[in-house]
Amino acid sequence: MNQARPLPGYLVSRYKGWKATTYDDNQAWYRHLAADGQHPRAMIISCCDSRVHVTSIFGADSGEFFIHRNIASLVPPCEPDGDHHGTSAAVEYAVTGLKVAHIIILGHSNCGGVAECHRMCSGNAPELEASTSFVGRWMDILRPGYERLQPRADDATALHDLEQEAVLISLENLMTFPFVADAVERGDLTLHGLWKDITNGSLLNYDTRANGFVPV
């Protein structure tokens, strides 16, 4: 039985405010987006965390970014097994359908998903090891990153390091998709790894030359 209920009043008020201001002031642009379709230059894979506001970080308008959000901004390896793969489907559509020029992985500080992965991998979250845990099985994507950080995976900077490792794991997994690897090889697509500190607003970019994250 469908359990959908009417939208909460505060959201109705916010929508009406947006419709009467932002939309009404930019009707021609919204009509153009509807008629001409979307042509974003970049795909951003970001965390579901409500504190990471992708469009505000880059001052983006509607139609600029193709955005996919999931727990901890992770990209799984390519597994064409016939199952449901939301993130993989989004990547495929962005590269083969929208022909984006850039894919950006955006990790962040204080990530709850990464913290849960650390608890699980360090043996402190048996509930996440259960086959029925959606969070646990998703965070298995990051387990190789935790193992790569050993034996320093439990020091004071463990979560910070694992958050950035999640970005690197996702960049590596992107290259397991043949259509991504082909587009990168042709020069039609570039991959980027970012990590945002939600406390001070700083943004770091992974630099292969420096073999680490450097300030933007």
Image (cartoon, rainbow, N blue to C red):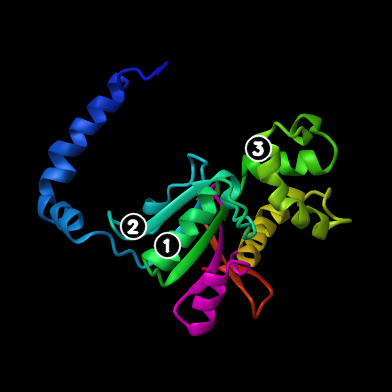
- Circle 3 is placed at which residue position? 135
Q: Nearer the viewer, residue 102 or 56?
A: 102
Q: What element does badge 3 sit on? A: helix
Image spot of residue 209 (x, y percent) = 65, 81
User: Of the residues tagged 1 and 2, which is closer to the observer?
Assistant: 1
Image spot of residue 98 (x, y percent) = 36, 65
- Circle 2 is placed at which residue position? 59
Residue 94: which numbered mark, if any?
1
Image spot of residue 26 (x, y percent) = 13, 51
| Residue 182 located left or right of residue 39 | right
Residues packed near mark 2 inside 10 Å, few (<14), some (14 to 19) or many (20 plus) = few
Q: Which comes before the other along the chain, label 1 or label 2? A: 2
Marks 1 and 3: CB-CB under 8 Å?
no
Which residue is at the far right?
Answer: 151
Q: Nearer the viewer, residue 187 or 83?
A: 83
Q: What element does badge 1 sit on? A: helix
User: Of the residues tagged 2 and 3, which is closer to the observer?
Assistant: 3
Q: Name above or below for residue 131 compared with residue 52.
A: above
Q: What element does badge 2 sit on? A: loop
Q: Give the amino acid at mark 3.
A: Val
Region of the chain picked out in magenta, as a range: 174-198
Residues packed near mark 1 inside 10 Å, few (<14), some (14 to 19) or many (20 plus) = many
Q: Residue at x 29, y 64 (%)?
A: 39
Q: Which comes before the other along the chain, label 1 or label 3? A: 1
Q: Give the amino acid at mark 1.
A: Ala
The verdict on residue 188 being magenta is yes
Cα distance in 3D space between marks 2 and 3: 31 Å
Q: Give the amino acid at mark 2.
A: Gly
Residues packed near mark 3 inside 10 Å, few (<14), some (14 to 19) or many (20 plus) = some
Q: Tell me the quadrant of the picture where the N terminus can be found.
A: top left
